[in-house]
Amino acid sequence: MRNRQSSMIVLALAIFLIIIIYFFQSEALFGPMSNTSMNRDQAQSQSEADQGERTATAEPLPIPELLEDTNPHPDQATFDIVSQNGSKTFVNDVETETMGYNGDYLGPVIRVRRGEEVTINVENQLEDELTTIHWHGLEVDGEADGGPHSGILSGETWSPTFTVDQPAATLWYHPHPEKNTGRQVYKGLAGLLFVEDEVSDQLAIPKTYGENDIPLIVQDKQFNADGRFNYHLAMPDIMTGLQGDTMLVNGSIDPYLEVNQEMIRLRILNGSNASIFELAFDSGITFHQIASDGGFLTEPVEMDQLRLGPSERAEILVDFSQVTKGEVVQLMNRNQSFMTFNVEGQAETAFTVPDSLTTIEPIEPSEAVRTRQFVFQGMGPSVNINGKQFDIDRIDETISLGDTEIWEVSNDSGMGMMGGTVHPFHAHGVQFQILDRDGRAPAPNERGWKDTFIVEPGETVRVIATFNSPGVFMYHCHILEHEDAGMMGQFEVK
Ligand SMILES: [Cu+2]
């Protein structure tokens, strides 16, 4: 009896000890729950601690160049893009093989105007490798969209021409070859595409590119121990898509940006293959989201955290005038800092957050001629939509040109196993309005134009769109490893 009592006490003590150890480990893993602003030395030592053995040194944020329009005609624009192999050093002074547009990694910003007739010459200089280039979020005909049907062989050039007819927005471009999109994007093929119009001209918001209008392509990567890129799909990547433990911003690890004490506009792209980012600033700084995927919201939305799935974009205004000179502000994903803003002196300009941004005509559900269902199903190699995996010779849905439709997208994938998998839905050549999520109105920052939206496990998202661009287009999960595995279908508008 006595023995039994003492062994019970030992057991209770052991459990207590395990709980204590677990608590302290969680604290070490996830960091303190509240962050306060740090000075530069503290920030650097925290940053070094985050990096562990790695010898990356903080560098200024690289700003992608604005691609030159070589067409002198005021209503036309011509751009030249080359997909090429390259190499770049990210960590440990080791060069890793990369891909880039007009360079070693990522690509320039293509800036176009509404109403402009645009031609983009895309030359494929990749060695023995087919590629395509898809203008993500652009409302163009299927022939110009750059999906898997528009393969460019090594040494060939593809030159689509289209007229831009949609509101100002931060879009992006990336390859879309069948079964090889994930690898090519991971190696570095991605760039931003800005649409400007009279609304963006007239808004009193920061718009000096690279100074107070800053692009942030945020990605996460896995590096091998030797510092090379690791695009090798093992478990759990086959299930989740390829997620990494190292964050890159415009291709740089832990970069810093010097800003004045003023309002800064950040155009953020989640350029990851598979990760959902939860972005926030330390020091309790709030910000205003002013644009979603397809353009400006009707009014700014004040937020302290931004959830962004793969391929989603958000433009935000951050007011650094409230930060003391010499302080640093960290941009964090899930409480881990991955970029630093060094706040310098006073600015010459003083922007304020506008009361309103643009008008968006809501598309009424009564205008819809039909409702289609899309169901994400399966796991790993069996991922599919509506029970079907991608077949380039099969058109899954046919839509009449000019029709308005409701698309009901649900996620049955992985239910009951490991908490399920989130799938971001994307359709080409069209911008949606979100009607509801499981019957509830969307959050204020999701009440603008969307071409990509997260669908949680078990959730049903209803969206509405008018299909004004003819041709064959893709709809798919934007976890690129799911897309490559066949979680994609085709719709034809005619
Ligand atoms: Cu998916």
Image (cartoon, rainbow, N blue to C red):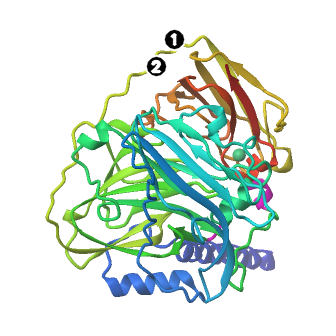
Q: Is disc 1 in contact with disc 2, using a CB cutoff of under 8 Å?
A: yes
Looking at the rendered structure, the secondary structure element under dot 2 is loop
The quadrant of the image that shows the N terminus is bottom right
Asked if one can make out residue 190 in the rendered structure from this viewpoint, the answer is no
Kind of residue sitting beneath label 2:
Ile
Q: Residue 476: name its quadrant.
A: top right
Is residue 234 positioned above or below 80 on the image? below
Residue 186 horizontal side relative to residue 136, left or right? right
Is residue 323 positioned above or below 80 on the image? below
Residue 355 horizontal side relative to residue 308, left or right? left
Circle 1 sits on which residue?
A: 367
Categorize mark 1 by other alpha carbons within 10 Å: few (<14), some (14-19), many (20+).
Answer: some
Kind of residue sitting beneath label 1:
Glu
Asked if one can make out residue 458 in the rendered structure from this viewpoint, the answer is yes
Q: Residue 486: image x %, image y %?
A: 81, 43
> What span is in magenta?
236-245
**Magenta stretch: includes residue 243:** yes
The quadrant of the image that shows the C terminus is top right
Rendered image: mark on residue 110: none
Q: Measure the alpha-carbon separation of dots 1 and 2.
A: 7 Å
Q: Residue 41: image x %, image y %?
A: 35, 87
Magenta stretch mostly in which secondary structure?
A: loop
Q: Residue 414: image x %, image y %?
A: 77, 44
How many circles with numbers are drawn on the protein?
Answer: 2
Residue at the farthest front position: 72
Rendered image: mark on residue 363: 2
Residue 448 horizontal side relative to residue 326, left or right? right
**Magenta stretch: includes residue 120:** no
Residue 157 horizontal side relative to residue 352, left or right? right
Give the residue displayed 57% in from the left and 44% down from the top: 136
Give the residue displayed 61% in from the left and 31% down from the top: 141
